[in-house]
Amino acid sequence: MKTSYPQYVKLLEERLTPKRFRHSLNVMERAVELAKIHGADPQKAELAGLIHDIEKNSPPKILLQSLQKSGILLSDADWVSPQLWHAPCGYLYARDRLGIADGDVLNAIRYHTTGRAGMSLLEKVVYLADLTSADRDFSDVKEVRRLADRDLDAALFYSLQFIIGDLVRQGKPLQPDSLACYNEIALARAKAEEQRIMKGGSCYGK
Ligand code: FE
Ligand code: FE
C-alpha cells in the first residue's frame, strides 16, 4: 500500500496488533477516498487516518497516566469507558512524540471515537473512514458507506443514532461530545424541516 508517510507505517506495525495495523491502513485508504469525494485535504486525511489508532493497543493504565499528565479533563462517561481513551491519547502522542502540529489533523485523531459539536470536514472524514473502512463488517456498514460517499452529515447522523440508541438500550451512559454532535445535526435537520413546512404553508392557515 502506497503512503506519503512510510516513517509511521513501521512505528504502527511495532505498536499495534496485526489486526489493528491492517485496520489503520484501511482507514488511511478510506480517509483519502472520502477526502477526495468531499473536498477535504487528502494528505491530512491520509496522515490522520493512518495514525488515528496509534494508542489503541496501549494498556489502560498507561493511557490514564498520559491523560492525567496532559491536563485533559475526562467527562464522567469517559471515566467508565476506557475504550475511548486511545483517541485523546493518540492526539497527545501525535502532538508530543511525533511533533505533528496541524490542529485539524490532531483534532481528527482526538475526536475519532466520539465526534463532537462543530466538527471540521477533516474530522468528519476521519470519523467516517474509521467506521466504514474495508475491515468493518457490522450489520449496517453498507448503508453507512453509501451515505458517507454522498453526504457526511447524513452518515454521521445515521451512525450516531445507531450508537446512541444502542447505548441507551443497554442502559449505558452517553458521552457528552457524542451527544453534542448528535444534537447539533438533529437541530439542523429539525430547523430545515420547519423551514420547509413554513415555505410550503401546508399546515398553517387552512
Ligand atoms: Fe479508534
Ligand atoms: Fe479505528
Image: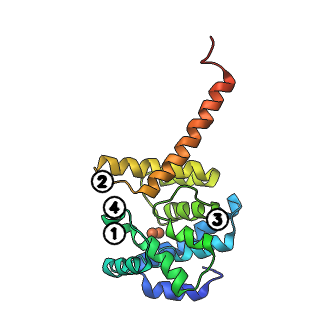
**Ligand 1 within 8 A of label 1's CB?**
no
Find the distance from the CA under tag 1 to the CA under tag 4. Answer: 11 Å
Which residue bears the numbered disc 3?
Answer: 33
Q: Residues within 10 Å of mark 3 (few under 14, many from 20)?
A: some
Say if residue 122 shows up in the picture: yes
Find the distance from the CA under tag 3 to the CA under tag 2. Answer: 34 Å
Mark 3 secondary-structure assignment? helix
Mark 2 secondary-structure assignment? loop
Mark 4 secondary-structure assignment? helix
Which residue bears the numbered disc 2?
Answer: 172
Q: Name which residue type carries label 2.
A: Lys
Q: How crowded is mark 1: few (under 14 residues within 10 Å), some or many (20 or more)?
A: some
Say if residue 143 shows up in the picture: no
For the point 50% across and 88% down, which residue is it? Answer: 11
Left or right of 42: which side holds 92?
A: left
Q: Which of marks 3 and 4 is in front?
A: 4
Which residue bears the numbered disc 1?
Answer: 82
For the point 43% across and 75% down, which residue is it? Answer: 71
Find the distance from the CA under tag 1 to the CA under tag 2. Answer: 13 Å
Q: Residues within 10 Å of mark 2 (few under 14, many from 20)?
A: few
| Residue 204 place in picture, x, y as percent | 61, 17
The label on residue 76 is 4
